[in-house]
Structure formats: structure tokens, C-alpha cells
Image: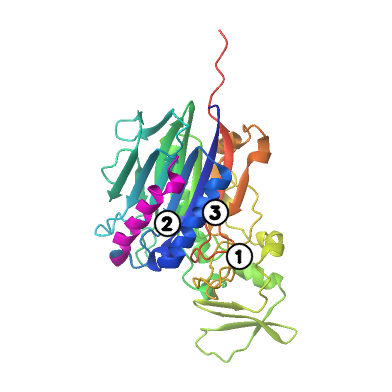
Amino acid sequence: MDNVGVLLITANVGSVCDEPDEMEINWLQEFYKTVQDHQAAFIALHLQEFGGKNYQENMGSADGFIRRLIESEEMSQYNCAQTFIDKDFTQPEKFTALASIYFIHNSLCNVQMYNFQEKNFISISGHTMWMGSLEDCPTVHKERFPQDFWLEFAWTRKGFMKTRWRVNDRIFDLVNLHLFHDASNLVSSDCSPSVYSANRRRGLYHVLTRLTDDCNAPFFLFGDFNFRLDLKSLIQAQGWSSSDTGDTDGQTAVYEQDGEVQLIMKCKRFEHQNAKLFQEDNVHMLLRFDHEPIPFLSELTEVQISFPPTYPFSEDVTKPTEYMTTRCPAWCDRVFMSHTARALLQKGKYEEACVHYGRIGGDVCMGDHKPVFLYFEMETKLDQPEN
């Protein structure tokens, strides 16, 4: 098999782990549907916030979610599955709550993983599941951001996890990432770029330094980047003017246009009156305020986004298309890649026609984050030099 179909999926499953039941059923059905639609030989699933906010209580049931996924009839054609779950929350200085699962189809034979301890590639087969702190796992490299990385912010379990693969002759890295969120809408809107944007920028530079120092293999970096729209610029562009709320504590901001309230904003409230502002027809306009990837374009690239923001969706299963009124909708969940990895997407049989970048479960409640996928064909047999 020279051209291999590759499916990369990223999903923040925090709310699915906190409220399983119907939401978990929806999540699995939409995942299986995406797998069926693309028929990829190699699938990489990166999960963030595994175990949810109440991970101490949820880890047991979250493990069951993974086992049901791997052992399902829908995934029976993938006879090799490699699973890595960072679940040891008793080591807070190392815990990231990341989980990475890789499925290899029966038709794909020559696949190896890199052993970071022995510094060589090893053959893999069957179902292998690593759980715990992953410190002793030789085929994954995991780091939590240092606890003193941002002294002004509370401890966080954000970090990254990397695996390295060889499929036939092709070597590439897959990196699961979770960056820092916005703590307050009011603080986020104070300046452009926001202070939270600066935190994420520093974190991402930290990860990229780790990647380029290691091997310089082509890499795909996909996870919850927590990238947000430039809120100050967005509000200004809408022509909304600030209204005096009489709030002497500065805990509420109200924006009006032509005497009508357009937005009410608090620390964790973002209530906009135009329900269509963040929907399908406005994707191109909203992307003008997606500033956070710009500093990294010399090192990273992304397939053009054509889907609405992926966060924060309602966790009410009866309102799958509605955003919660907590944060400004944004493209938090992304698939980026190095420029050398992007070149691999051009090697498919049908060139760009075989590349699909999209959002999963647009009409189904899958939690506050909609998963995002990238499908492409990759040429894995390298041309042999002539004698």
C-alpha cells in the first residue's frame, strides 16, 4: 500500500466524561460515522481533559469509554490499537489528562513506533494500552508545562504528548496538545492581543522548541489550542459602543448599537443578541479575528477552515447547534502541521481533492467542544534512487 489514508481527530472530552450517558452515545456514533465516511488505514485520535473536571471520580468510567470504543464492532477492522492515557492525577506535577489512541487497519502491515528510550523503531501488533503517568512508557514522550511557567496563574494540567511513527518508508510525529484557556472575558477584551493569547503563545513556542530540538521529523500538532478570537478587535469591528451599566465594580460590560443592546459580558458570561453572528455564513468574517496562529506561520500551517467555531457548545443534548453564553465562540480545536508535513498532503493520488478538514457532529450534542478532523492521503513509499 503506497498511498495510505490518514485520519487525524482531536476532541476535548471533558464534558463527555462529566456527563456520559446520552452524550457519550452521541459522541461514539459520530466518531464511527466519521471513520466509516473516510475509510482511513491509519487513525490518530487525540483527547484532552480525559476524565473531565471531576477526574478523581470519573477516571474509572472514562476508562470504560475508551474500552468500548476500541472493542466496538465498528472498529473491528483495525486489528492494531495503541492507547496511551495519562491518568495518574496523584502526581500533579506530571498529570496532563491527555489520551492518545491510534488505530491501524488490517490492510496496513508495515507500521512501527519509535522507542524513545532505545532510540529505534519497533514493530507493534494487537491492542496495547498504557495507563498511568506514562513515565515508563518507551513509545511516548509526555510533558506537562512547568508549574512555575506562569507564576501569576494557578496550577494547570496542560501539556503535550508525542509519538513517532514509521509507515512503510515515511517517518512523522503526532503531537497531542492542550494549551491554556481564557479565565475572564473582561480581561480578554482589555487589550489586543489579550494577556491569555500571550500565555498560549509562550506555551506553543515551548512545545515547538522541544519538537525541533529532537529530530526535525515532519509533525502534525493537533489538540485543544484554546485559540480565541481577538475579542477587542471583534467588538470594535461590529461598531458596538460601550454602555454605562452603573456597575461600579467593573464586573459587567454592555455594548450597544443604535440604542439596542448587542452584547452583555461578564467574567464568564458572553451573551450576544445576534444568534447568526457565529454561524456558517460568517466563517470568513470571523476568521479575520483569528489572530493567534499568525506568529507561528513560519513554522506551522493549517488547511483552510470552512466550518464554524468549535467551542463553547451547549451541553444540553436538546440544543446541539447552540453556543453556551459563557465565552465568545472560537476555533479552539485545530490540526496544525509543520511545513514538511504539509508537503505530504500534496502526495495523494488526487492532490488537494483528497484533503478534508472539518468539524464533527454539527447537529449532535458531543459536549462543549465539537471534535475536528483532518483526512488526507499520504504517499509512504519513497522513490528508490536508480543504480
Which quarter of the picture shows residue 111?
Answer: top left
By secondary structure, the bulk of the magenta-drawn segment is best described as helix
Disc on the earlier residue, 3 or 1: 1
Q: Is residue 300 visible?
A: no
Query: For mark 3, what is the residue?
Result: 372
Query: For mark 2, what is the residue?
Result: 48
Few, some or many C-alpha atoms within 10 Å of disc 3 (few <14, some 14-19, many ≥20)?
many
Disc on the earlier residue, 1 or 2: 2
Label of residue 230 in the image: 1
Q: Is residue 343 above or below residue 182?
A: above
Residue 109, x across and y down, in percent: 44, 29
Residue 178, x across and y down, in percent: 44, 55
Which quarter of the picture shows residue 344?
Answer: top right
The part of the chain drawn in magenta is 57-77
Q: Spot the residue most to the left.
A: 90
The residue that appears at 45% across and 61% down in the rendered structure is 25
**Circle nearer the viewer, 1 or 2:** 2
Q: State yes or no: residue 62 in magenta.
A: yes
Could you tell me which quadrant the C terminus lies in? top right
Distance from disc 3 to disc 2, alpha carbons, whole Å, reads 12 Å
Inspect the image, locate mark 3, and give the three-letter code of the amino acid beneath it. Answer: Val
Q: On the rendered structure, is 278 left or right of 181?
A: right
Q: State yes or no: residue 54 in magenta.
A: no
The residue that appears at 65% across and 79% down in the rendered structure is 273
Distance from disc 1 to disc 2, alpha carbons, whole Å, reads 23 Å
Q: Is residue 249 visible?
A: yes
Q: Is residue 18 above or below residue 359?
A: below
Is 27 or 214 nearer to us in this picture? 27
Residue 296, x across and y down, in percent: 56, 48
Residue 57, x across and y down, in percent: 29, 66
Inspect the image, locate mark 1, and give the three-letter code of the amino acid beneath it. Answer: Asp
